[in-house]
Image (cartoon, grey):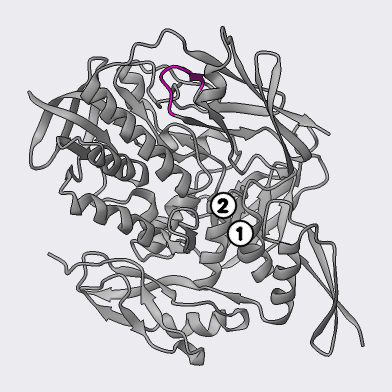
Amino acid sequence: MKNCDLVIIGGGPAGLAAAVSAYDAGIRDILILERDNCLGGILNQCIHNGFGLHTFKEELTGPEYADRFIRQVLERKIEYRLSTMVMDITPDKIVTAMNREDGMFQLKARAVILAMGCRERPRGALNIPGFRPAGIFSAGTAQRLINIEGYMPGREVVILGSGDIGLIMARRMTLEGAKVKVVAEIMPYSGGLKRNIVQCLDDFGIPLKLSHTLVDIRGKERVEGVTIAQVDEHMKPIPGTEEDYSCDTVLLSVGLLPENELSKCAGVALNPVTRGAFVNDRLETSIDGVFACGNVLHVHDLVDYVSEEAASAGRHAAEYITSGEKKSDSAVPVRAVDGVRYTVPTTVDPKLCDEMVTVRFRVGKVFKNSFISVYLDDERIQHRKKQIMAPGEMEQVILPKKTLLARDGLKEITVRIEEA
Amino acid sequence: MVETKHLTCICCPMGCQISVDMEDGKVLKITGNTCKRGEIYAAKEVVSPTRVVTTTVKVDGGELPVVSVKTEKDIPKGKIFDVMSVVEEIHVKAPVAIGDVILPDVAGTGVNIVATKNIAKAG
């Protein structure tokens, strides 16, 4: 079995940024394992622009953003294997993978970074009645077919879910000549960015029906039509509100799920809210030397934050490799309450943490003119007004190490939303 | 005659419903915005809305059948479908590199179509 200082699972935006930062922190023996036949991950099919405003101060398309990081990896001659599927990770960091050239192989890693990303929630998770005809795609599958493989999946389209991928695909299919009849969203608000609602739907006169869902899919061989109905406050369809649409294609844009099968193999403890690992301020999971970043840790809104988080994971993994495990005896839990659905990280060690700790979170509903507050035990140390917060956008607070250290016997850090 | 245009601000998740009173193509009054950014956005959007168009172009002899492209700058919103119908017809030969001009001055906009992905030759 070969030894390797750092094995990175996944060559998308998270894996690439983690690799670059670990290299720059002095680690040379790095291997990125990527299941697809190219680096860059999902960015390769996200051909729309709007990426990189924070990182590069310009608007790039997904492939261009990926290329910036791929070039950094190539310049540093960081090793990677494509078309390589990781099968298993053990708690003592033995990684089993396979590809066509090497067959099955094992690596003993000193540190592992989990950067596997997420995948789309499938139809099976939704319990939509009806037959199972051809023509039902997740939005991301349709995106891949059009933007990478050059196929057009349909001509008359209904989209369920108003996440950003669904909105982007409404525009993309319209540009390619399809008729997108409606986007139905079960929630009373869209999970997508305002910019996408305006530029992907309003620009083309595509109606967005909030508090509506799909109650029937018709057609036996190919989709022939769907029925959409309004839902009540318990998300139950209201009888009498049904509307029929004829269509040959249904796209589902109904949420993303971190892909943590490998994390489970390794015994990494997972947060039921994010479905990603519990991590400390160094982005280390419950297993020593196993770090996580990007959408496998929690689903992000902007790739810029993925790159930032992954760079932090890479740096901390490098630190772990060069100076060994930091023995934490003073980790303080971070609690998410009152409108804050979760935080990443879930513990901070004031003695071991960086000078500034970024705590990322999402809110559970739309808040207007409310405050993001941070408490150290009972004392409020931050109170920042936000005109608007929505579940679709990540929020963050930054905790200075100094402030945490100044407080003896700190028991817990609480992040909450306080309404005016 | 005063005409009122309604639009949704895209500057932040607030999505303010902005109304713009106009006369002879000139902005008279902007209301409904809650910050300066909204005013700037609305003033431009009602007079000359522009968009960057991103799509794909067919590739001959490449490792992938299509390459992603964009308009190098934003183009008038009303020209989106003119651009699409021109770009639809184009074939390029692999290899293609990021930044390659695929088509200069698309649909009389003065803006180039450029590649946003590297596509190597097949095989």
> For residue A346, which numbered disc appears in the image?
none
In three-dimensional space, the C-alpha distance between marks 1 and 2, rounded to whole angstroms, equals: 7 Å
| Quadrant for the N terminus of chain B in the image | bottom right
Q: Which picture quadrant has residue A22?
A: top left
Q: Is residue B59 left or right of residue B108?
A: left
- In the rendered structure, which amino acid carries the disc numbered 2? Asp
Q: Determine whether the residue tagged by mark 2 lies in a helix, strand or loop.
A: helix
In magenta, the rendered stretch is A346-354
In this rendered view, identify the residue nearer to me: A250 or A266.
A266
Q: Percent from the top left, x then y, of residue A83?
A: 20, 45
Q: Residue at x 44, y 53 (%)?
A: A55
Q: Determine whether the residue tagged by mark 1 lies in a helix, strand or loop.
A: helix
Disc 1 with disc 2 on a shared chain: yes
Q: Percent from the top left, x then y, of residue A151?
A: 38, 64
| Quadrant for the C terminus of chain B in the image | bottom left
Please state the chain letter of the residue tagged with numbered disc 1 in the rendered image.
A
- Earlier in the chain: of badge 1 and badge 2, it is 2
Q: Which residue is mark 2?
A: A164
Q: Percent from the top left, x then y, of residue A144?
A: 39, 56
In this rendered view, identify the residue nearer to me: B102 or A184.
B102
Q: Percent from the top left, x then y, of residue A396?
A: 58, 36
Q: Is residue A347 magenta?
A: yes
Q: Residue at x 32, y 57 (%)?
A: A68
Q: Which residue is mark 1?
A: A196
- In the rendered structure, which amino acid carries the disc numbered 1? Asn
Furthest-bottom residue in view? B108
Q: Are marks 1 and 2 in contact (CB under 8 Å)?
A: yes
Q: Residue at x 65, y 77 (%)?
A: B49
Q: Which picture quadrant has residue B86?
A: bottom left
